[in-house]
Image (cartoon, rainbow, N blue to C red):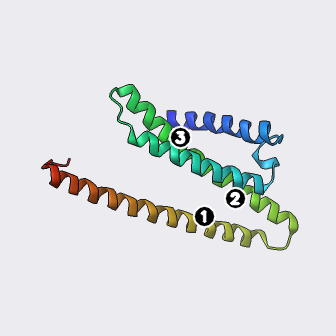
Amino acid sequence: ALHFVYAWAQLDTVNALFFTYLLGCKGPRTCGYANTFYFALGVSVVFSKGASILKLETRQTAWGRASTALMTKSFSLNTGWAWATYCSTAIDSAQTHELIDPVWMYFIFTAFAWVCITFLHRKFEVERRAWDRHCRQEAETYDLTLR
């Protein structure tokens, strides 16, 4: 539960910086779907890079490992929340135009989310298999045993 609270505080801080300070909006829901898209894209890029840097570091202490796990979990939660906010503001914006029935809008955005998650999961699995293959080759080269 601690990572959830930490992620929420982190997202509030990033939201305040981006939407309130930089854009002058009251929050993500009042800034329009285009700005929330840029925010979600930026959060995805920055937090993905941050998580990959944290994963590369080897922490010696239990506190260091716990803080790395806490930050990594918060990065993934915040990325998901940022994209959920984008989808919500885009649906709200589309409903104001009344061109498409709200049920169809939710269906379109659900399909969008499903395609994105499928793509990201596939990318993750490809990278994981490549990493496992690399570890096996290194273990064979240096005569090591894998856990």
Q: Nearer the viewer, residue 106 or 81?
A: 81
Q: Give the CA distance from mark 3 to mark 2.
A: 20 Å
The answer to whether 35 appears left or right of 121 in the picture is: right
- The answer, for residue 1, to whether it is visible in the render is no
Image coordinates of residue 125 in percent, x first then y, are 39, 62
**Residue at the left extreme, as displayed:** 143
The answer to whether 55 appears left or right of 84 in the picture is: left
Q: Which residue is painted at 64% across and 49% down in the image?
A: 42
Label 3: state its secondary structure.
helix
Q: Nearer the viewer, residue 16 or 53?
A: 53
- The answer, for residue 65, to whether it is visible in the render is yes
Q: Give the CA distance from mark 1 to mark 2.
A: 9 Å
Label 2: state its secondary structure.
helix
Label 1: state its secondary structure.
helix
Q: Which mark is residue 74?
A: 3
Q: Where does label 2 land, which residue?
A: 87
Q: Which residue is painted at 15% across and 55% down in the image?
A: 140
Image coordinates of residue 15 in percent, x first then y, are 70, 40
Q: Which residue is painted at 15% across and 47% down in the image?
A: 144
Circles 1 and 3: CB atoms closer than 8 Å: no
Sequence-wise, the earlier of marks 3 and 2 is 3
In the rendered image of this protein, does residue 104 appear above or below residue 67? below
In the rendered image of this protein, does residue 10 appear above or below residue 36? above
At label 2, the amino acid type is Cys
At label 3, the amino acid type is Ser
Circles 3 and 2: CB atoms closer than 8 Å: no
Q: Which mark is residue 113?
A: 1
Image coordinates of residue 119 in percent, x first then y, are 51, 66
At label 1, the amino acid type is Ala
Image coordinates of residue 84 in percent, x first then y, are 65, 54
Q: Which mark is residue 141?
A: none
